[in-house]
Image (spheres, rainbow, N blue to C red):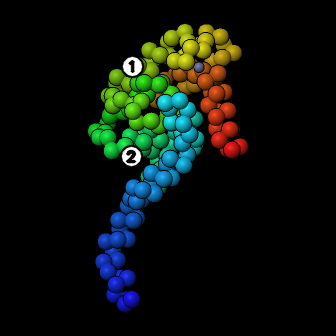
């Protein structure tokens, strides 16, 4: 082998690697942090503290469910958001459970759900012992379900222990 063979168009190859990781590597790394739970694919990696998974494309931080959507080859216009319309499980990264939605629509849906008396999984949100009150960076008050948090924490613990 000659040196020239190795050094063919080095700048172009280097640039490609630096800006975006190979799709296959990205996919493998992503799905190594996912466990199946019924129809849902649960994100076992880190979260943003508000119940959404956090993933990386290279060094760029993205929502795990957004990356799942991109990996599924589905289009996502700038400014649009993805809502867990099917399962309401914000840690789910099954693209089939997501729907594209506007930011305003999304805020309205979650605000309405936050006023309900039970969480999407039917646990009480009127029992103060089961409610975790959170204020998001945008200033929304959210009433999170402690039982749902316990279930998702347990899942992460089991994944780590496995
Ligand atoms: Zn799901
Ligand atoms: Zn949503
Ligand atoms: Zn719940």
Q: Which residue is mark 2?
A: 71
Spatial CA span between label 2 and label 1: 27 Å
77 to 141, vertically: above or below = below
Q: Quadrant of the C terminus?
A: top right
- Out of 133 and 62, give the one closest to the viewer: 62
44 to 145, vertically: above or below = below
Q: Residue at x 53, y 29 (%)?
A: 38
- Out of 43 and 106, give the one closest to the viewer: 43
Rendered location of residue 52, percent (x, y): 51, 35
Q: In terms of sequence position, does the residue under pointer 2 or pointer 1 come before the other?
A: 2
Q: Quadrant of residue 73?
A: top left
Question: Is residue 42 left or right of 74 when viewed as pictured?
Answer: right
- Quick check: can you spot residue 137? no
Q: Residue at x 42, y 24 (%)?
A: 86
Q: Residue furthest bottom?
A: 2
Q: Which residue is mark 1?
A: 108
Rendered location of residue 126, percent (x, y): 61, 9
Quadrant in which ligand 3 is drawn:
top right
- Give the structural element (helix, strand or loop) at label 2: helix
Q: How many marks?
A: 2
Q: Quadrant of the N terminus?
A: bottom left
**Badge nearest the viewer, 2 or 1:** 2
Q: Residue furthest right?
A: 161
- Give the structural element (helix, strand or loop) at label 1: helix
60 to 40, vertically: above or below = below
Q: Residue at x 51, y 36 (%)?
A: 41
Crowdedness of circle 2 by 10 Å Cα count: few (<14), some, many (20+)? Answer: some
């Amino acid at each position: 082998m000659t040196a020239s063979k190795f050094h063919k168009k080095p700048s172009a190859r280097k640039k490609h690697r630096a800006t975006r990781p190979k799709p296959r590597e990205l996919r493998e790394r992503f799905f190594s942090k996912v466990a199946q739970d019924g129809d849902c694919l649960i994100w076992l990696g880190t979260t943003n503290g508000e119940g959404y998974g956090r993933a990386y494309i290279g060094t760029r931080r993205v929502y795990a469910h957004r990356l799942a959507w991109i990996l599924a080859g589905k289009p996502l216009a700038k400014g649009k958001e993805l809502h867990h319309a099917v399962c309401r499980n914000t840690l789910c990264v099954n693209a089939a459970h997501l729907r594209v939605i506007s930011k305003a629509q999304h805020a309205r849906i979650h605000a309405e759900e936050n006023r309900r008396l039970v969480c999407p999984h039917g646990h009480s949100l009127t029992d103060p012992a089961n409610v975790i009150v959170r204020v998001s960076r945008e200033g929304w008050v959210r009433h999170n379900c402690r039982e749902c948090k316990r279930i998702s924490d347990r899942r992460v613990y089991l994944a780590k222990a496995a």
